[in-house]
Amino acid sequence: FVWGKIAPITLSGEKVPSTPELFDLTREAERIGILPLGGEAGLGIWENPQDGDGFSLSLEILRIVAQSSASLAYAWHNRALGQYIARGIVSRTDQNDIVALDTHAGLARYSLARLFQGASLSEDDDAILTDYFGSAETATKKRYVAWIHEAPVFLPVYENKSLEWHLFSWSAFEHENVRTHGLDHLKHSMVRIREKPLKKSPALSKNAANFIQVLSLHAAGLLAIQTGLAESAKKTALSYALEREQGGSLLAKHPAIQELLLTINGAVNQANTSLASLKAPGSIVELVDTIEKRASLQDALYSATTNAVQVLGGYGYMQDYLVERFVRDQNHLALLGGGVTESRLFLAELKGLNSPTHESATNSNYSTQSDTIERRNALHPQRAMGKLDFVARHLVTYEPSSVWQMDTDLLPRALAKYRTRMRDFAREHIAPHALSLDQQKNSETLKKIFLEAAREDIFADLLPPPVGKGRFDVTLHPMPFFASLKAEELCAACGGIGLALLAHALGVAPIVLSGDIQAIARFAPAVLGRPERGVPPKIAAFAITEPAAGSDVEETEGASLYKPGTVARRVPHGWLLNGRKVFISGGDIADYVSVFAALENEGMESWTCFLVEKDFPGISRGRNEKKMGQRASSATELIFEDVFVGDENVIGGLRNGWAINRAVLNYSRTPVAAIALGIARGALEAAEKFAVNQKLGRSRLVEFQEVQLALSNMMIQDSAMRAMLWQSSNQWTMRQYRASAAKVFCSDTAVSVCKQAMELMGNHGFTASHHAEKAWRDARLTQIYEGTNQINRLGVIEDQWQELENFSQTKI
């Protein structure tokens, strides 16, 4: 049924299935007996006495369905939870009820654990649980619901120090449809109660046994779905690795790819083993076991799925390849039922309740930090240090200052002003359009941003006058350094718009780094522009990647065995180009394209850079890729059919293209690291604003110690990225070691920061109306372009190979 009926609809890259199609599949599953999960007895979602092992059987169904559609598996799982509550708790026989378990933030589970154990609840506990679960009689914070049809919804409600299940008709809600990170096949709503419930359960028993069982079932079902997703990612990655060649051999034979595949396989096997060992829900013991297993596997399953994206490289980032959807679904599901940190805090509280010191230890869980943070406290460092003498206060300070300002103060005056100017531009002209251009590209809006960028000399500030428009006091510093300052500021506002602006510099780089004075003199005025005269720059793009070669054009060993796909044939006074280039940032709007092509009947050692103009006969644009993120900047296929390029448009001389390409990459990888840093900083700032403005109970989230730990960890990672980047880019002579190392570290760390921001924001983290969700999608691309991080790691070794060889002469 799954592979014959569900897969043909849900595994198609052509369109997203409609909710009626999914509902029809659900009805057919009911007809043939797959649903309801748990049989007619209704003893529990996965307790079917006829099978004797219904728990494992139904988890297996969810796992298999998830391999085709995590969305449909989640919808069935949600209905099964509704069925369990309806039959077992409120004596309702309707099979269509669904559940809304997830709300605005997760920290309430500390208090929930105490409720489960029957411990006395403090005023803070009571306020938090009331805020978290809400009251049926009053407007509450919005709850998240994923659905394939409008159905009655069960909500847990906290009243009179106990939990009850209240059933609401769909019309009882104010609901707002939202776009989310994953589970694309479903409709997603944030709902707020506006009418009284249809039905209420009796108050749950003192230890909330029924609710404990529901949470246990929820965690088990989510783990099964996440495992199925990882299995699909594994199959996709392995299939690709067994079909695709790189460096003259199958990808699957490359050790770097083998390591990724083995990591994926290990996570899937571990998850399947844990699934098989789960016990049917009962007491807190089973709840702890289930949540503990899911928490321990969350990171492994996430890594497995994102590693599959990495195996596919650029193709893995595109929506036509299903692994892109798998990783978004995995991220989305990881935040449902509590993220990793929340789950571990919940477990710690459940396990620690029998401790004789529990009461005194946990009373501080919700005490806010405001008293110790406020300056009026006599022990506050800022107040205490004010008593030190003049010299000491200048050696050690505690004066308020943002990390951004502290770092800016370290810069030379010219660069500090430059960084400030870039931040101001990004806030005024980029940030207001970040979310809208991510959802739908608008060429007119982009044109306005490009025009403002030209007026600010953002396209022309890499070189000083008379060639460029860079200010002398800025261009006295290494180009990669101030280019990285600019990239961070633009991409902190939006990774996609930032890339659209920065890709122009990448297209210009071959002209500048070739050292070809005639080419610089001829093309620089056009590509740098004269906005003060009303002449905007002509946009440039950089084209090296071919359909059959990803990293082969970015790595020595692979390139030596690769047969070039884009070839230049000699004709009188010039060359005819034939071939295709893919994933070209800004290729759809570029006036000039730096195209790297091999000479006819020669290999990659003959690579030559040709500057192709958009109006040359024979050049055409193929598709613009559907990307996971950075959507404001296109990734375009360019097709060359007998495109004549005159000798005067050969950049840097014949057969020098490989050297120019490597030089460009060594220069551009530090700005890519800065792009990643900027995106991560944007996510961090979004998380900080959320934590300061969002309340839980009587306190702001930022006053909870767990949130403070998460924010501080992100801040530390942000500073570590910037320290490495500034050290690597503040060089007049760029080295591959520094450029590749910075790119790897910053892009990997940026994805981690964005993931932490999403988790801190709970359900808000996976809705597309919040910056953290977009930031994760944007950051993920920085691990792929300018060479995958696996290739860049090899680049670090390639640069240091001779030094490593020197150790052969050293006695150990």
Image: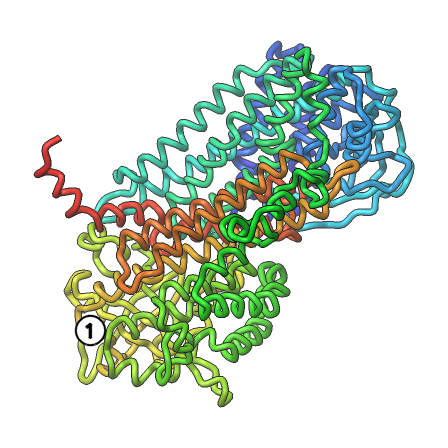
Figure colour scheme? rainbow
How many labels sit on residues?
1
The front one of 310 and 2 is 310
Residue 47 appears in the rendering: no
Position of residue 483 measured from the top left corner of the image (x, y, whole percent): 41, 66
Residue placed under numbered mark 1 in the picture: 569
Q: Is residue 548 above or below residue 360?
A: below
Dividing the picture into quadrants, the one containing residue 71 is top right
Vertical comparison of 83 with 586: above or below:
above
Query: In the rendering, at what x and y percent does residue 555 appear?
Result: 25, 53
Q: Residue at 69%, 28% (x, y): give it.
A: 365
Residue 406: x, y in percent? 52, 55
Q: Nearer the viewer, residue 695 or 304?
A: 695
Image quadrant assignment for residue 467: bottom left
**Apparent side of residue 312 relative to residue 29 in the rendered image (left or right):** left
State the residue at coordinates (52%, 17%).
Answer: 276
**Residue furthest bottom as drawn:** 533
Residue drawn at (57%, 68%) of the image: 424
Residue 606 pos. (x, y %): 17, 66
Q: Is residue 746 among what the camera can see?
A: yes
- Relative to residue 286, is residue 267 depicted above or below? below
Q: Residue furthest left?
A: 809
Rendered view: 597 above or below 260: below
Q: Quadrant of the N terminus?
A: top right
Q: State the quadrant of the C terminus.
A: top left
Residue type indicated by callout 1 = Arg
